[in-house]
Image (tube, rainbow, N blue to C red):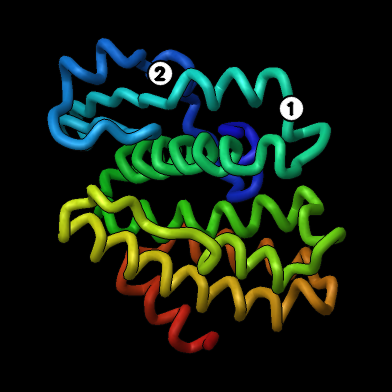
Amino acid sequence: MQAGLEALYRIRTEVDIEAFVIDEAARSELASGRAAREQLLVAGGPGDLELGLFICRRALANLRTNDPGQRLGEHNWQDFLLVLEGVSHFVCVVFRAQLGRPVSALELELQAEIDKYVTCILMGWHRGAGSGELRERLFRGFRFHDDLPPDELARYREANTRAAAYAESLEDRFVRQRRAGEMLEELRRFYRLGYREKCDVIAQAA
């Protein structure tokens, strides 16, 4: 997944995500609060960044058994999205740190939601059901966890709303017209923008 995202956005972090994956015991020592199934722990700053990525072992085991690269379906869909979100967060944080630029938790959530949609499109998920149904499942066919703190809930809602609008725009302008090359060019420019700039692009494209 890391290699796929870096190829998609034409970036090279030169960092192996596997060296930063931590288990549940390590996560418990380093973090307090809600125990999510996927969690990127970040400490320090651009010049001295410490990272740890926790992902539920059951999700990883399911993807090893049911490789989404071979077939993405109901049997591995949710776990694929969970792992992809963690990888998306990791790659984005490392990329920004190497540029000496900050990235907010809100932007990480926005980018991860967009990464999910684009990755599923490129993997051909929409061919069986339609890209509109994919958007519906990603951005509306779910519910937020009841134990989310108010600030996290607000962040997820904003990221979801903006990502849904951008995905609909991508579908209208590129996916339906099979203009994959032009879509990738836009996505690569988008990836390098800051959060406010990304919001401006989404508003203009809507």
Q: CA distance from mark 1 to mark 2?
A: 19 Å
Q: Quadrant of residue 155?
A: bottom left
Q: Nearer the viewer, mark 1 or mark 2?
A: 1
For residue 67, the mark is 1
Q: Residues within 10 Å of mark 1 (few under 14, many from 20)?
A: few
Residue closer to the observer: 76 or 182: 76
Please give left or right for residue 135 compared with residue 57 in the image: right
- The residue wearing badge 2 is 21
Please give left or right for residue 25 compared with residue 171 in the image: left
The residue under the point 58% across, 42% down is 78
Kind of residue at disc 1: Asp
Quadrant where the N terminus sits is top right
Q: Secondary structure at mark 2?
A: strand
Please give left or right for residue 130 compared with residue 173 in the image: right
Kind of residue at disc 2: Val
Q: Quadrant of residue 86?
A: top left
Q: Position of residue 196 (x, y in %)?
A: 30, 73
The residue under the point 61% across, 80% down is 169
Q: Residues within 10 Å of mark 2 (few under 14, many from 20)?
A: some
Up/down of 25 relative to 159, above or below: above
The residue under the point 64% across, 58% down is 118
Q: Position of residue 120 (x, y in %)?
A: 69, 52
Q: Position of residue 142 (x, y in %)?
A: 49, 59
